Amino acid sequence: MRGILRLRWNPALLVGGILTTLLIATALISLFWTPESPTRVRIALRLKAPLEAGLLGTDHFGRDVTSLLMVGAWNSLAIAWPAVLLGAAIGTAIGCAAAAWKGVADEIAMRVSDVVFAFPAVLSAIMIGALVGSGPLAAVLAIAVFNIPVFARVTRGVALQVWTLDYIAAARALGKHPLRITWEDVIPNIAGALIVQVTIQLALAILTEAGLSYLGLGVRPPNPSWGRMLSDAQTYLSQAPHLAIAPGVAIALSVLGLNLLGDGLRDALDPTLRGRDVPV
């Protein structure tokens, strides 16, 4: 009951859940409906202010900014989600292996993670882009590579704590294989920490995708992207500041919502909070 009340009365979880739900709903709605076609050019309506032509005005090509934002939400999630899940899958496997076998395997895994972690996602995107070409695939791979050491370290840390528990020692004494212990006993106990980390890394992935698109390394035009919208808006800041404000606010609210959701989930799933009284 207390766990349910904590979920209900956690303001970070509530606000983060609302903002994240709006983000996902906007992205899904854009798949089958937008106020205007995001690629429809209307030169006669270029640089119109909000409410003068559409809810959020138009850009330098006369395209509807609201429609661009909606489709941009989908393009951001379409890159961020696969990238984070791929990085989480590989990083979790590495972290679990390092915690299970320790010794040389642990040392090698952590040193390799240090090397990979030294390269920012933007630099990784440039190197990967040189091999496979710039675009969504390069962005996904770059963000995934950046996330691998993050999840490897988080997984190793929480998994090592689980491996010290008595029931794990009993399973090892009975001759249970480390792989089976990891799958049946360790992973279920660290799933909460991994879910929280996925939420936080998803916020960073959206921010990174916007940065890559801003530099021309992410979503290719004419496909809308929040980062591309910010890049295009630079030339028209004095004439049409709404072109920069709209995608900037969208990115800020999305990142804020996911971070608040991650913080709220962490508080709700943290076993050290289960004994605390919840105000009602």
Image: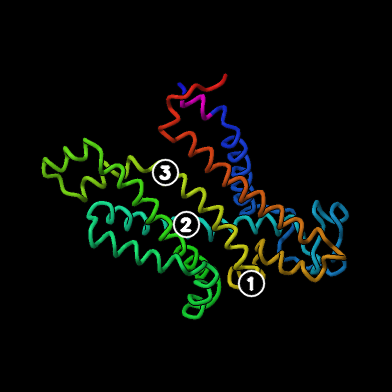
Q: Do the residues labelled 1 and 2 touch (CB within 8 Å)?
A: no
Q: Name the residue under label 3.
A: 193
- What number is the disc on residue 197? none
Q: Distance between the residues labelled 1 and 3?
A: 33 Å
Looking at the figure, which quarter contains the C terminus? top right
Left-right relation of 11 to 41: left
- In terms of secondary structure, where does tag 2 sit? helix
Label 3 crowd (10 A; few <14 / some 14-19 / many >=20): some
Which is the main secondary structure of the residues drawn in magenta?
A: helix
Classify 11 as above or below 216. above
Q: Which residue is drawn at 48% across and 69% down?
A: 119
From the viewer's side, name the closer residue of 111 and 3: 111
Q: Earlier in the sequence, mark 1 or mark 2?
A: 2
* Tag in front: 3 or 2: 3
The three-letter code of the residue at mark 3 reads Ala
Q: Name the residue under label 1.
A: 215
- Residue reaching furthest to the top: 280
Q: How far apart are marks 3 and 2 (CA)?
A: 15 Å
**Color theme of the render:** rainbow
Q: Position of residue 83 (x, y in %)?
A: 48, 60
Q: Are marks 3 and 2 in contact (CB under 8 Å)?
A: no
Classify 37 as above or below 99. below
Magenta-colored span:
3-7
Q: Distance between the residues labelled 1 and 2?
A: 21 Å
Q: Name the residue under label 2.
A: 84
From the viewer's side, name the closer residue of 43 and 96: 96
Q: Residue at x 37, y 56 (%)?
A: 152
Q: Examine the structure image and report whether residue 254 is included in the region drawn in magenta.
A: no
- In terms of secondary structure, where does tag 1 sit? loop
Residue 136 location, quadrant: bottom right
Classify 255 as above or below 5. below
